[in-house]
């Protein structure tokens, strides 16, 4: 029987996932859960057959170029693959997989939390109470925006976008969306399709971003497009920070053009632009879209299913390159 493949594990994975790895592979674990500098990651990959990174392990073309020839697959523990240069991997004949579907519910929950947190000023309320600064109540105290029955816009009606739209329907919201392709009527479920982001924006009381980060979507929400949202709109981002021009967003929040924003993702995570901290009408979470035990297990198992298929000579289900 051939030796079990050697796999480099980018970060500390859930216990059950690491148990399966230990049973079926020769894993190089990361028990301290450190973010490896590129040079260390590359040296760990010496003699390895596979790499299992998270979005925190950046694999641009110059790193992919230095991966040892033995590495045949990058099986991501993430649905987003913007941290991997797919063309470079393809060029070297390295397979790349991701973990779709299994995190859609968890991420949609966080999109709802971001929407409500922003609309109802949850961050401000928390800060006030924890600072011991809640002194009185009045009808004008902490008045926010009601979302029930309003229009909910989705950029990117893929798996997460569709689940999020379903959750928003629970607040009787009218769904508007744009997507590379219009969905079948059954999946659309009455949502109004707009051909472009520019067409969509004027129809969104809440806008939720669910498209991948690509060169085309970099700074998609810039000053010009933010200005197309209705006065008092709310912006939600659980996708990737790269999609928003953060300076333009801060300007729109400071001026009151946007009522609020709820963000789970940022351009330079975890080093968030400090200017955000001084803006009250923004609800900030630390990239926890998929952070439930159930979902993190499912992501790990999905990555391992891809790895198992690859080493069994089958096409991995979630191959993206
Ligand atoms: C994960 C995510 O926490 O899967 C993704 O693309 O953004 C998150 O839900 C993270 O990327 C895991 O690597």
Image (cartoon, grey):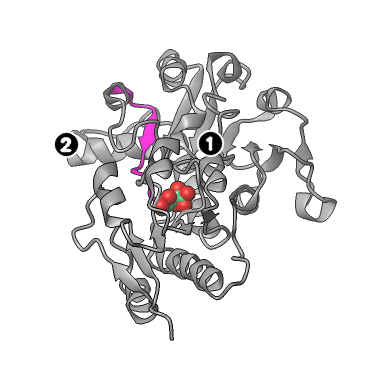
Label 2 neighbour load within 10 Å: few <14, some 14-19, many 20+: few
Rounded to the nearest angstrom, the CA distance separating label 1 from label 2 is 37 Å
Judge whether residue 98 is colored magenta.
no
Task: Give the x, y percent position of residue 160.
Answer: 59, 51
Q: Is residue 214 left or right of residue 63?
A: right
User: In front of the other: label 1 or label 2?
Assistant: 1
Against 12, is 188 above or below? above
> Closest to the observer: 197 or 97?
97
Against 92, is 138 above or below? above
Q: Residue at x 50, y 36 (%)?
A: 236
When asked about the image quadrant of residue 280, the answer is top left
Task: Give the x, y percent position of residue 122.
Answer: 36, 40
> Closest to the observer: 136 or 164?
164
Residue pushed farthest left? 132
Write down the residue under mark 1: 213
Residue 248 appears anywhere in the view = yes
Q: Which residues are magenta?
A: 278-289
Q: Residue at x 58, y 15 (%)?
A: 227
Judge whether residue 281 is colored magenta.
yes
> Closest to the observer: 34 or 193?
34
Task: Give the x, y percent position of residue 237.
Answer: 49, 37
Write down the residue under mark 2: 131
Instruction: Label the magenta part by its dominant secondary structure.
Output: loop
Of the residues under marks 1 and 2, which one precedes in the sequence?
A: 2
Numbered-mark total: 2
Is ligand 1 within 8 Å of the beta carbon of the residue shown at mark 2?
Answer: no
Against 285, is 272 above or below? above
Q: Assign a secondary structure to mark 1.
A: loop
> Closest to the observer: 67 or 193?
67
């Amino acid at each position: 029987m051939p030796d079990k493949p050697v796999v480099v594990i980018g970060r500390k994975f859930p216990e059950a996932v690491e148990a399966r790895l230990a049973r079926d592979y020769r894993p190089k674990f990361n028990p301290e859960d450190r973010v490896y500098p590129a040079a260390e990651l590359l040296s760990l990959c010496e003699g390895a057959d596979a790499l299992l990174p998270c979005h925190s392990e950046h694999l641009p073309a110059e790193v992919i170029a230095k991966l040892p020839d033995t590495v045949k697959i990058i099986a991501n523990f993430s649905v987003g693959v913007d941290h991997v240069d797919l063309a470079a991997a393809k060029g070297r004949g390295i397979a790349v997989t991701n973990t779709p579907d299994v995190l859609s519910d968890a991420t949609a929950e966080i999109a709802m939390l971001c929407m409500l947190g922003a609309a109802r000023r949850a961050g401000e309320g928390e800060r006030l109470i924890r600072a011991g600064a809640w002194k009185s109540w009045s009808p004008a105290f902490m008045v926010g925006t009601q979302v029930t029955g309003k229009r909910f816009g989705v950029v990117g009606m893929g798996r997460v976008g569709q689940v999020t739209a379903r959750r928003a329907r629970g607040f009787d919201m009218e769904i508007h969306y744009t997507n590379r392709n219009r969905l079948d009527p059954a999946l659309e479920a009455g949502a109004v399709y707009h051909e472009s982001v520019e067409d969509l924006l004027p129809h969104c009381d809440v806008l939720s971003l669910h498209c991948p980060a690509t060169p085309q979507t970099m700074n998609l929400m810039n000053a010009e497009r933010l200005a197309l949202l209705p006065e008092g709109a709310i912006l939600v981002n659980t996708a990737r920070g790269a999609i928003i021009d953060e300076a333009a967003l801060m300007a729109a929040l400071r001026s009151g053009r946007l009522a609020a924003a709820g963000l789970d993702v940022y351009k330079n995570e975890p080093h968030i632009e400090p200017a955000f901290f001084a803006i009250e009408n923004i609800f900030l979470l630390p990239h926890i879209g998929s952070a439930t035990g159930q979902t993190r297990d499912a992501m790990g198992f999905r990555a391992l299913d891809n790895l198992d298929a690859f080493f069994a000579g089958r096409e991995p289900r979630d191959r993206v390159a």
